[in-house]
Image: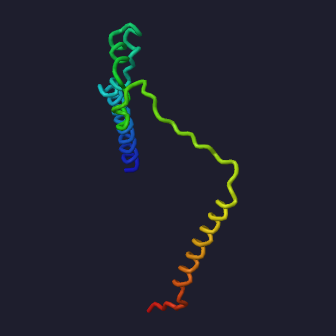
Amino acid sequence: MDNLSIFLFVIAGISTLVGAFYLMASAGMSKEVQDYNWHPMKDGGVESPEFKKYMRTVTKRVHPEMKDVEPGTELMGVTFDKPDSCSLEEYKDLQARIEALRAELEDDEEEDDDDGVIVRV
């Protein structure tokens, strides 16, 4: 009985291995994979009609916002100047806004704190 179970296990393993290699080979030889692996330089080089047709086709989609833009149109560019210093008045105004927001947040936290003990039954 022990030899029979070993024999069946080996047969099942070998048939699984053969089936896996057959599946990989048949998938690799399918038309979809062959078309995916096609390269324009494969059949005749630069002078072949397939290569010329391939070079005439657009392979990238155009962004939806660039549909109406003609080739060669100058696009707008923006350069932001980084200020080296800030005025004292701007700094004081900013600091006052920060302090006001900080005080407002602290007031909100104090209102939420009711010092109540929650007991679950």
For image coordinates 35% across by 44% down, the residue present is: 8
Position of 114 with respect to 95 (left or right) is: left
In the rendered view, tell whether residue 69 sits above or below residue 5: above
Q: Nearer the viewer, residue 118 or 58?
A: 58
In the rendered view, tell whether residue 92 sits above or below residue 80: below
Q: Quadrant of the C terminus?
A: bottom left
Q: Nearer the viewer, residue 103 or 90?
A: 90
Q: How is the image coloured?
A: rainbow
Number of callouts: 0
Q: Nearer the viewer, residue 51 or 70?
A: 70
Q: Nearer the viewer, residue 64 or 17?
A: 64
Q: Residue furthest top?
A: 47
Query: Where does the image place residue 110, in percent across and percent down from the top left?
Result: 56, 83
Position of 80 with respect to 49 (left or right) is: right
Location of residue 97 (image quadrant): bottom right
Query: Where does the image place residue 23, in percent across and percent down from the top left?
Result: 33, 33
Query: Where does the image place residue 47, in percent across and percent down from the top left?
Result: 38, 7
Position of 39 with respect to 87 (left or right) is: left
For image coordinates 59% across by 72% down, the residue present is: 100
Q: Residue furthest left?
A: 31
For image coordinates 53% across by 84% down, the residue present is: 111
Query: Where does the image place residue 68, in percent across and percent down from the top left?
Result: 34, 32
Location of residue 62 (image quadrant): top left
